[in-house]
Amino acid sequence: MISIFNGDINLCGVLVLTALVLDFLDGFLARMMNAYSELGKQLDSLADMVTFGFVPGMILYKLFIDHYPIAQHDDWMFKIGSIFMFTVTLFSALRLALFNIDPRQASYFIGVPTPANTLLILAFPFIALHDEFGIASFLFQPFALLMIAAVCSYLLVAEIPLISLKIKSLKWSESKAQLLLILGAVILGLTLRYAASPVIIIYYIILSLIYPPHKKQIA
């Protein structure tokens, strides 16, 4: 929160990525040490709510107020729009609660996971700083930011089965979708750099539609 308020997006990025790694490792270590508990599950969701719920809402809020004309900060549209940025935070809370009670999400995701959504939103400040493709002037218009907040909120709870990143085998036939996702993400990251995140999420959804994880589970 402090790094966002201070405009230090690089530090914010480092902290979010660190939290992402720790979020993966805590579950891995809990299973390895047979230390899984209901308390740990709830604490994990509460920690996720801050890092992957409040943080993306705060990033969008900061982008909105920074790119909205200062002379119009007293307008009702600015006040409503800036608050609307936290719709992502509300839907993140809803998604985390649904994840805890939805048995379908044991082997695949329903809707975009909160960490992936946060990485998507985290990319926007970096796009603003390093506008390599000349898209910042369009992306950071108030209406565009409102649309981004709305779409990101919808994707969190959309009834779209998405591939889980848990690779149980390195065999191509068994983990084709996951390996294609990782390979595609690496290629897109190297070519598009900071602008890669939104494209990777689109690629993730398309790949999940081509290789539906829920049908694989039934089979």
Image: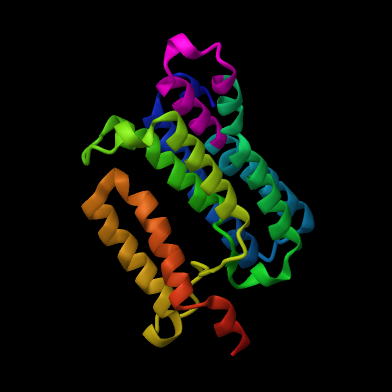
- Front residue of 134 and 23: 134
Residue 74 picture location, percent across and down: 55, 11
- Front residue of 199 and 164: 199
In the image, what residue occupies the spot 38% across and 41% down?
123
Q: Is residue 136 above or below residue 69?
A: below
Q: Quadrant of residue 133?
A: top left
Q: Quadrant of residue 102?
A: bottom right
- Front residue of 163 and 13: 163
Report the side of 200 relative to 112 (left or right).
left
In the image, what residue occupies the spot 78% across and 57% down?
38
Q: How many badges with numbers are in the image?
A: 0
Residue 69 is inside the magenta segment: yes
Q: Which residues are magenta?
A: 57-78
Residue 59 picture location, percent across and down: 49, 32
Can you say which quadrant of the picture contains the C terminus?
A: bottom right
- Front residue of 129 and 6: 129
Q: Main secondary structure of the magenta part?
A: helix
Residue 187 picture location, percent across and down: 26, 61
Q: Is residue 25 above or below residue 209?
A: above
